[in-house]
Amino acid sequence: MKTSKAVILAGGRGFRMNPLTEVIPKALIPIDGVPILLHQLRQLERLGVKEVLILTGYLADSIEKFCNTLSLSLVIKCVPSNPSNSQSERLIYSREEIGDHFLLIYCDNLVKSDEKIMQLLTSKGVMTFLIEPREEGNIQIRNNN
């Protein structure tokens, strides 16, 4: 495996998921009763990733407290930043800690296929992207829940 470190961007406010994200960060929104972040962390653990940096911002304390309750074989470190920082600013400010080889994941984008992620982890290319077609677009909370 070429890459054994993952970086999860989990600092945004999740405006499209209001009112849920007024009290819970989008990384902790449950899918089938399990926070999306936990789905991602379990998947990374299955794939042999050793270290995960979670770049937080909005409601950073909630994400860190959640991660401190987990019993996974991953080394998980939350790196807080100003909630108004952009995704690229979070990456730039954490560059030394991140290093040069890592898998970048958005906390609100769950890729179901372990095989697709494994292809990225073992890729020999300088940079590789995974674009996954979806039947529907972004998650949106409707008035009828």
Image (spheres, helix red, strand yellow):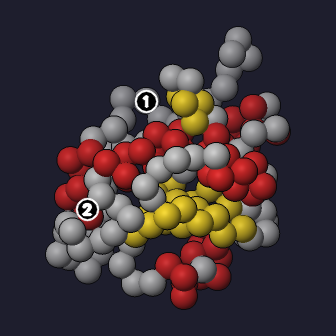
Q: Which mark is residue 85?
A: none
Quick check: can you spot residue 56? yes
Asked whether 95 or 89 is in front, the reply is 95
Q: Residue at the location (60% across, 80% down)? A: 94
Q: Quadrant of the C terminus?
A: top right
Q: Which residue is the extreme one toward the right?
A: 22
Image location (x, y in percent) of residue 137: 47, 35
Image location (x, y in percent) of residue 120: 25, 62
Q: Which residue is mark 2?
A: 120
Quick check: can you spot residue 63? no
Q: For mark 1, does the 10 Å Cα neighbourhood hold few (<14), some (14 to 19), or many (20 or more) residues?
A: few
Asked whether 110 or 40 is in front, the reply is 40
Q: For mark 2, does the 10 Å Cα neighbourhood hold few (<14), some (14 to 19), or many (20 or more) residues?
A: some
Select label 1 or label 2 by which is in front. Answer: 2
Q: Is residue 4 above or below residue 13?
A: below
Mark pair 1, 2: CA separation: 24 Å
Q: Residue at the location (51% across, 23% down)? A: 32
Q: Earlier in the sequence, mark 1 or mark 2?
A: 2
Image location (x, y in percent) of residue 90: 64, 73
Q: Which residue is mark 1?
A: 136
Image-quadrant location for residue 80? bottom right
Residue 119 appears left or right of 40: left
Q: Give the residue type that dot 2 points to.
A: Leu
Q: Residue at the location (38% across, 65% down)? A: 50
Q: Give the residue type that dot 1 points to.
A: Glu
Is disc 2 placed on a helix, strand or loop? Answer: helix
